[in-house]
Amino acid sequence: MRSWVATQPLLHCKHNPEDYFPYQIRSRLKELEKTFESLGRLYSEHSSKDGSKRLLVQLSDLQLVETVLLPRDGVCVSSQVGCAVGCAFCMTGRGGLKRQLGSAEIVAQVVLAKRLQKIRKVVFMGMGEPSHNLNQVLEAIELLGTEGAIAHKQLVFSTVGDRRVFERLPLGRVKPALALSLHTTRAELRAKLLPRASQIDPGELVELGEHYAQATTYPIQYQWTLIEGLNDSEEEIDGIVKLLKHKRAILNLIPYNTVEGLDFQRPSWTRAAAMARTLHQRGILTKLRRSAGQDVDGGCGQLRVRATQPEHPTPNKR
Ligand code: SF4
């Protein structure tokens, strides 16, 4: 796989492979490319008004995962088919874990994305929990940060938090940036929202993140899916200030993308903006973000759920 990643820029540029590769590789290039392309084929694509594009990618066993092309040269990749964490507000979590992705299948999503747009940033925020597939995700990160020549800071490992992540990430040759899904500062609410995440107290999670931030000098991105009436209270604002003030932290407030059949509501943009403003005034670097592709059934796992049901849209077969 390493040589495949290295060959990608050459295979898709104007130079002739004959100028670069020894005969043994040249004679098998077509066959190699065919094998690797079968790891992740474009099944369908769905453009969004915000400039993102959601791709359904079909793996060699016909399972589907979502990959999102992001504006400003980014891609969001999946690390599992399904997910075992079972977040109460997430469609992917509803179906449980189907299977792990291999590192080659993760990298294949980036290669596919590179054929469609320039890629300078890879975020591991698609379907699945990267800490539950740690060896494969770290192998993919190492490849992308070395042979793939993506800046280490532009590789973003996103997790609900697991002690193994804090042990393994600092040891890697490529140290990615880290995004921690916090969602609430209240341990009991977090246990309900993320029922099968490692039960680490939010305070301890932030301390573990802070150690990694100091070691790498990159700030930690704390993800906060903002749900009306659930985690948008004054009490939560106080809790955030207590946990994150004077830390190397960026808080990303992401208003919840309402999912049909799930009993959670998206707060108004005005309300979310007011919360961001208050947090700013109280010394927390806060960004109010839209989740990519909201107008194309693009909540976590929604596209895949639609595609695996009978009324799914006609795929753009390639
Ligand atoms: S939000 Fe992420 S971690 Fe939670 S169930 Fe969905 S995919 Fe898994």
Image (cartoon, grey):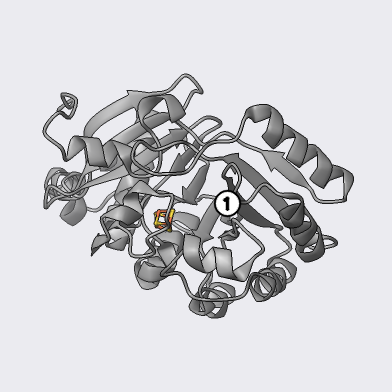
Give coordinates of residue 9: x percent, y percent: 38, 40
Residue 232 relative to residue 291: left or right: right
Splitting the image into four quadrants, where does ligand 1 fall? Answer: bottom left
Which of 72 and 232 lies nearest the eye of the viewer? 232
Q: Which residue bears the numbered disc 1?
A: 151
Q: For label 1, count other residues whose C-alpha is less than 10 Å away and answer few (under 14), some (14-19) or many (20+).
A: some
* SS label for mark 1: loop
Q: Can residue 198 be seen in this view?
A: yes
Q: Which residue is painted at 63% across and 51% down in the image?
A: 231
Which of 101 and 50 lies nearest the eye of the viewer? 50
Q: In which quarter of the image is residue 103?
A: bottom left
Q: Quadrant of the C terminus?
A: top left
Q: Which residue is painted at 64% across and 69% down in the image?
A: 202
Q: In which quarter of the image is the N terminus?
A: bottom left
Compared with residue 66, is residue 137 higher up or lower down, i.e. above or below? below
Q: Which residue is painted at 71% across and 58% down in the image?
A: 219
